[in-house]
Image (cartoon, grey):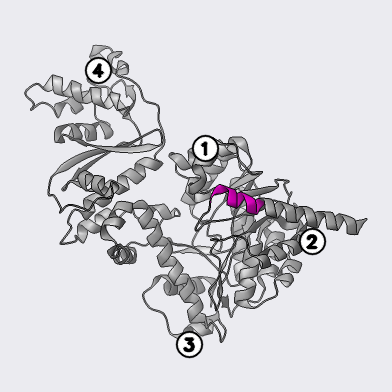
C-alpha cells in the first residue's frame, strides 16, 4: 500500500499561549497540529480548545511518547489513550518520532536516537505495523534531531527510514530543521539525506528554529525558521513537491501573528518553488 | 551490543548520577574531536533534568515560587527516587506530596499540604466534565427510597484532609505576597472544576467526612450519619447537601439499593 499524501496546506502547532485566540476566533491557518499527550486527558481546557479547533479545520495528532524504538513492550495504556483521542478528534494525520524514550517503564520524555542496525529495523518495523493495525490507519514517523551517533550503526538514518517505510508501510514526517541540525551535529550532507528519502512516503514537513551553541546546534524551537532551514526547505520542495507543512514554535512562544507569519512565509516559498518547477517542466 | 543493552546504557547515562568513563562511552557512541561522545550524551542528560523540572514547576507553581532556587534541588532529589513512569510528563509530580510527607522540610512542614492542594487542583483541571443536577433530583425520589440513594458526584471533585492551612498559603502566593510561617491547622478542603475553572474551599470536618463517604459511593443514610452528633443533625445534613447541589458538585442521584 502506498501513502496517500493529503492536501492540507500550511499549519502551525497549537500551543497553550494561543488557546484564547483559537477559542475566540476562526483558525488563522489551513490546519493545526496538536501534541497528542497534551490532549489525552478526558476534560479541561486543552481538549475543549482542540475540539473547537477541530470544528474549524483539520488537525494532526503529533505524539512524543509512543517510544516506537524502545525494547520495552508497546504501552497498552498509551495506545488506549491515543486510540481514544484519535476516535474523538478524527485527525487528518497521526504522527510520532523515529526514536525511543522509555526504558523498563521509565520515561525520559525525550526523543533518543536509535542505532541504525538490522536488529533495530526489524524491531521498529514490527512495532509500527502493530500500532497501525491497532489504530486502523497509517502513521508517519519524524526524523529526530540528533546529537550523538552509534558505532554499531550500519545504515544511515535516511536508509533506515526508507527501508522502514517499505517494510511497515508507514509514512515520513520530514522535519527539515531536524535534518539540518543532525547534519551539522553528526557531519553528513543534508542533501544526501533528502536524496535518500523516497518521495512517495513523505506525508508532512516540519519547519522550526534552532540555536547555535557553538560546538553543536540545538533543536530549541525558540525562534523563527533560520535562513539555512528555509534553503533546505526549498530543496525538499524540489524533490517532494507540495507537502502539508507545519511551523513548530515551542519555547519563547511569540504572539500568534508571528507564528502565522512564518507559516505564510512557508506558503510563499512553496508557491515560488512549485511555479519554478512548473516553468521547468514546460 | 544488542539494542536492549544499548538502550540500558544510554538510559543510565542520561538519568543516572554518573557520567560514565570516556573509554566505555567511546566504544559505543560516536563523537568527534570537537565534541566528544561524553559531551554529546551530556546534552541529553541536561535536557532530561530540565524538561522534568519544568513539568514539576508547571504543576506546582506556588510550591516552586515559595522555594525559589531550592525547588530545583528538591525536584532532582524527588526525580531520583520517583522517575517518570507515565507517558504524560504532566503526571511526573503525582508522588511529590507523598515524598514531602516522607521527607518533610524541617522549616516548612506545610510544603506537603501545599503540594497536595496543587496536585488536586491539577487533577481537577484535567478531570472529565459532567452536567450538574439540582436538589429537585433528590426531592423527586419516593421517601422510602431516599435513605438508600447514592449521589453521583462531579469527576473533578476531591476532598483533602490536611495538617496545615494550605489554602491560606496558596492564597498568599497567588496574590504574590510573602508566605506566612507554617500554621499547623488541621484543614479539610474541597477541590473541583466548574466549566474550565478550578476552585477550592474549606469544609467543616464533619461535612468533609460526609462528602468523602459520598465520593466513596455511600448511601444518603450513611452520608447523614456523619451529622448524628450535631445539635440539629437533620438541619445540618440538609444544609450541607443543599450546598453540594448549589456548588454543582452533584451530577446525579441514583436510587438504592
User: How many numbered marks have been drawn onto this rendered protein structure?
Assistant: 4
Q: Are marks 1 and 2 on the same chain?
A: yes
Residue range corresponding to the magenta coloring:
A255-263
- Quadrant where the C terminus of chain A sits is bottom right
Label 1 belongs to which residue?
Answer: A23
Q: How far across and down, in percent of the image, does residue A117 sit?
A: 62, 73
State how far apart marks 4 and 1 are (Cα): 42 Å
Left or right: B65 as drawn, with respect to A131: left
Q: Chain of mark 3?
A: B
Question: Which of labels 3 and 4 is toward the front?
Answer: 3
Label 3 belongs to which residue?
Answer: B23
Q: Chain of mark 1?
A: A
Label 2 belongs to which residue?
Answer: A238
Q: Tell me: residue A90, above or below residue A138.
A: above
Left or right: B175 as drawn, with respect to B180: right
C-beta proximity under 8 Å, tags 3 and 2: no
Is the residue marked by circle 1 packed among few (<14), some (14-19), or many (20+) residues within 10 Å?
some
Q: Element type at marker 3?
A: helix
Can you tell which mark lies on residue B146? 4
C-beta proximity under 8 Å, tags 4 and 2: no
State how far apart marks 3 and 4 are (Cα): 74 Å
Question: Which of labels 4 and 2 is toward the front?
Answer: 2
State how far apart marks 1 and 2 are (Cα): 37 Å
Q: Chain of mark 4?
A: B
Which of the two labelled residues, at mark 1 and mark 2, occupies the earlier sequence position? 1
Residue A212 versus residue B257: which sits nearer the camera? A212
Q: Element type at marker 1?
A: helix
Q: Are marks 3 and 4 on the same chain?
A: yes
Q: Are marks 4 and 2 on the same chain?
A: no
Q: Element type at marker 2?
A: helix
Question: Which of labels 3 and 2 is toward the front?
Answer: 2
Amino acid at each position: 500500500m502506498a501513502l496517500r499524501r493529503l492536501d492540507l496546506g500550511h499549519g502551525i502547532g497549537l500551543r497553550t499561549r494561543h488557546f484564547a485566540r483559537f477559542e475566540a476566533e476562526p483558525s488563522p491557518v489551513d490546519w493545526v497540529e496538536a501534541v497528542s499527550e497534551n490532549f489525552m486527558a478526558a476534560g479541561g481546557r486543552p481538549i475543549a480548545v482542540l475540539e473547537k479547533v477541530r470544528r474549524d479545520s483539520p488537525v494532526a495528532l503529533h505524539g512524543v511518547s509512543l517510544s516506537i524504538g524502545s525494547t520495552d513492550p508497546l504501552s497498552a495504556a498509551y495506545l488506549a489513550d491515543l486510540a481514544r483521542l484519535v476516535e474523538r478528534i478524527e485527525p487528518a494525520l497521526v504522527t510520532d518520532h523515529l526514536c525511543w524514550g522509555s526504558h523498563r517503564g521509565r520515561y525520559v520524555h525525550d526523543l533518543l536516537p536509535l542505532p541504525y542496525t538490522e536488529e533495530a529495523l526489524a524491531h521498529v518495523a514490527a512495532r509500527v505495523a502493530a500500532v497501525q493495525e491497532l489504530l486502523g490507519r497509517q502513521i508517519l514517523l519524524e526524523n529526530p534531531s540528533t546529537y550523538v551517533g552509534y558505532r554499531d550503526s550500519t545504515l544511515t538514518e535516511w536508509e533506515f527510514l526508507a527501508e522502514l517505510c517499505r517494510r511497515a508501510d508507514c509514512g515520513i514526517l520530514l522535519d527539515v530543521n531536524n535534518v539540518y541540525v543532525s547534519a551539522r551535529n553528526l557531519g553528513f550532507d543534508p542533501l544526501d539525506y533528502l536524496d535518500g528519502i523516497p518521495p512517495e512516503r513523505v506525508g508532512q514537513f516540519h519547519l522550526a528554529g534552532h540555536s547555535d551553541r557553538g560546538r553543536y546546534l540545538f533543536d530549541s524551537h525558540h525562534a523563527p525558521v533560520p535562513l539555512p532551514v528555509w534553503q533546505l526547505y526549498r530543496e525538499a520542495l524540489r524533490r517532494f513537491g507540495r507537502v502539508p507543512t507545519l511551523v513548530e514554535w515551542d519555547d519563547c512562544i511569540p504572539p500568534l501573528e508571528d507564528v502565522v507569519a512564518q507559516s505564510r512565509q512557508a506558503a510563499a516559498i512553496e508557491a515560488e518553488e512549485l511555479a519554478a518547477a512548473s516553468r521547468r517542466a514546460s | 551490543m544488542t539494542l536492549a543493552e544499548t538502550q540500558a546504557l544510554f538510559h543510565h547515562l542520561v538519568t543516572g548520577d554518573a557520567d560514565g568513563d570516556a573509554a566505555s562511552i567511546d566504544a559505543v557512541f560516536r563523537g568527534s574531536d570537537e565534541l566528544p561522545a561524553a559531551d554529546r550524551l551530556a546534552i541529553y542528560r541536561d535536557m532530561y533534568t530540565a524538561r522534568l523540572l519544568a513539568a514539576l514547576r508547571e504543576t506546582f507553581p506556588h510550591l516552586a515560587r515559595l522555594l525559589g532556587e531550592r525547588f530545583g534541588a528538591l525536584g532532582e532529589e524527588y526525580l531520583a527516587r520517583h522517575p517518570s513512569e507515565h507517558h504524560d510528563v504532566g503526571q511526573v509530580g503525582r508522588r511529590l506530596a507523598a515524598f514531602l510527607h516522607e521527607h518533610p522540610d524541617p522549616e516548612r512542614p506545610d510544603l506537603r499540604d501545599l503540594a497536595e492542594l496543587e496536585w488536586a487542583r491539577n487533577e481537577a483541571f484535567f478531570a472529565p466534565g459532567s452536567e450538574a443536577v439540582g436538589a429537585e433530583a433528590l426531592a423527586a425520589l419516593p421517601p422510602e427510597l431516599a435513605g438508600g440513594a447514592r449521589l453521583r458526584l462531579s469527576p473533578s471533585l476531591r476532598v483533602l484532609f490536611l495538617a496545615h492551612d494550605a489554602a491560606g498559603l496558596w492564597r498568599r502566593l497567588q496574590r504574590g505576597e510573602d508566605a506566612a510561617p507554617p500554621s499547623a491547622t488541621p484543614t479539610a478542603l474541597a477541590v473541583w472544576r466548574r466549566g474550565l475553572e478550578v476552585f477550592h474551599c474549606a469544609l467543616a470536618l464533619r461535612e468533609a467526612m460526609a462528602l468523602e463517604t459520598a465520593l466513596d459511593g455511600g448511601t444518603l443514610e450513611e452520608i447523614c450519619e456523619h451529622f448524628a452528633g450535631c445539635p440539629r443533625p437533620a438541619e445540618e445534613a440538609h444544609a450541607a447537601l443543599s450546598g453540594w447541589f448549589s456548588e454543582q458538585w452533584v451530577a446525579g442521584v441514583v436510587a438504592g439499593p
